[in-house]
């Protein structure tokens, strides 16, 4: 199993969680487009919903659009195709080109970790969600690629080479900070095995996860680095394969209705009582 199959499997698990959501969204945002499972499962579940796919990488959008076209034709042949449009937009997830409250479901499968700071992305997702709209996402946690990180640390000490992933509890705090209600978070670990480091790197690149390897020292000899990396990673080999751990963080939260301002506050009026007039005393005349 490679990263693309992992993304499809996680998308299928996310979709299963929608069994408990009874409302059909009018418009769905696929934030971080790329998974074919979004087409095959979400479109089947919500055939009348309008889909908007947004990603900063144009190549991911092109691949997603091709898969969406094939899936749409397949669904139409089965009589399951909807009449609503599907749009693809190249944009930063931290600056979504959508109006406030314009979508009912934000779906984000293995995309949130691509941002070094997820907080602005979560703020934008909250902004574009309609009241009582749902955010459902998956992302990668800090144990992801722990073997690769350790091998790089051995091959090139003191220079980071693997993207730092945000902890599940920190993401939960961010959800509350941005105004989401009732966040639910959980985590699972998946291990994918590879024949060698080169195959792992190719899989990360082809799946759009090349950013996981971008924090590298400039000018370092690539050949020397990869020779050291290959030797260090060999210490992890088990049963003839190199393991790569992926910590999968699942989460969902709702955009609540704004709390109404208190309306039962009554002004308190103070009335000044009439001033007491001093009594005037009259002395008795003396004889």
Image: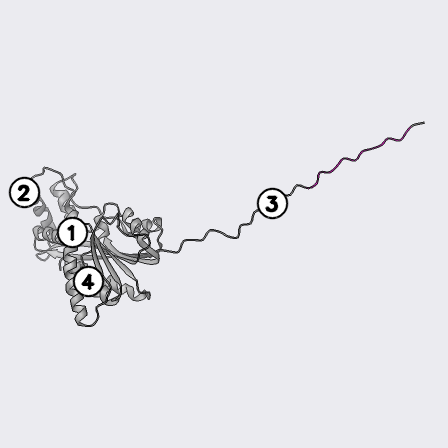
Left or right, 118 with respect to 259, comes to left
Q: CA distance from mark 2 to mark 3?
A: 82 Å
Quarter of the rendering containing residue 85: bottom left
Residue bounds of the magenta highlight: 273-285
Circle 2 sits in a helix, a strand or a loop, which is it?
helix
Q: Quadrant of the N terminus?
A: bottom left
Q: Between tags 4 and 2, which lies in front?
A: 4
Residue position marked by numbered label 1 in the rendering:
58
* Position of residue 91 measured from the top left corner of the image (x, y, whole percent): 21, 49
Q: Residue at x 16, y 63 (%)?
A: 69
Q: CA distance from mark 3 to mark 4?
A: 64 Å
Residue 279 forms part of the magenta stretch? yes
Whether residue 287 is situated above or below residue 127 in the rendered picture = above
Q: Earlier in the sequence, mark 4 or mark 2?
A: 4
* Position of residue 127 measured from the top left corner of the image (x, y, whole percent): 32, 51
Left or right, 163 with respect to 135, comes to left
Depth check, front residue: 240 or 162? 162
Residue position marked by numbered label 2 in the rendering:
223
Q: Earlier in the sequence, mark 2 or mark 1?
A: 1
Q: CA distance from mark 4 to mark 1?
A: 19 Å
Residue position marked by numbered label 3 in the rendering:
269
* Position of residue 172 measured from the top left corner of the image (x, y, whole percent): 32, 52
Left or right, 239 with respect to 75, comes to left
Q: Between tags 4 and 1, which lies in front?
A: 1
Quarter of the rendering containing residue 222: top left
Q: Earlier in the sequence, mark 3 or mark 4?
A: 4
Circle 3 sits in a helix, a strand or a loop, which is it?
loop
Q: Between tags 2 and 1, which lies in front?
A: 1
Mark number displayed over residue 37: 4
Quarter of the rendering containing residue 70: bottom left
Circle 4 sits in a helix, a strand or a loop, which is it?
helix
Q: Between tags 3 and 4, which lies in front?
A: 3
């Amino acid at each position: 199993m490679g990263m693309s199959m992992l993304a499809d499997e996680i998308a299928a698990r996310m979709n299963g969680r929608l069994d408990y959501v009874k409302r059909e969204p009018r418009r769905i945002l696929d934030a971080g487009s790329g998974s074919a499972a979004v087409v095959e499962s979400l479109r089947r579940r919500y055939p009348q919903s309008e889909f908007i796919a947004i990603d900063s990488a144009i190549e991911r959008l092109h691949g997603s659009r091709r898969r969406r076209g094939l899936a749409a034709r397949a669904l139409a042949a089965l009589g399951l195709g909807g009449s609503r449009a599907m749009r693809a937009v190249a944009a930063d997830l931290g600056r979504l080109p959508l109006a406030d409250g314009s979508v009912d479901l934000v779906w984000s499968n293995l995309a949130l970790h691509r941002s070094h700071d997820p907080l602005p992305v979560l703020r934008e997702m909250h902004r574009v969600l309609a009241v009582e709209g749902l955010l459902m996402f998956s992302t990668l946690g800090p144990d992801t690629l722990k073997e690769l990180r350790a091998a790089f640390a051995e091959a090139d000490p003191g220079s980071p080479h693997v993207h730092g992933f945000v902890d599940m509890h920190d993401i939960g705090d961010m959800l509350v900070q941005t105004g989401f209600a009732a966040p639910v978070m959980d985590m699972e670990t998946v291990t994918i095995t590879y024949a060698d480091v080169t195959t792992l790197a190719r899989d990360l690149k082809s799946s759009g996860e090349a950013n996981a390897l971008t924090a590298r020292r400039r000018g370092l000899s690539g050949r020397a680095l990869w020779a050291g990396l290959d030797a260090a990673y060999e210490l992890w080999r088990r049963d003839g394969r190199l393991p790569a751990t992926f910590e999968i963080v699942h989460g969902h939260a709702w955009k609540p209705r704004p709390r109404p301002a208190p309306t039962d506050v009554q002004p308190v009026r103070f009335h000044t009582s009439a001033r007491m007039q001093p009594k005037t005393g009259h002395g008795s005349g003396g004889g």
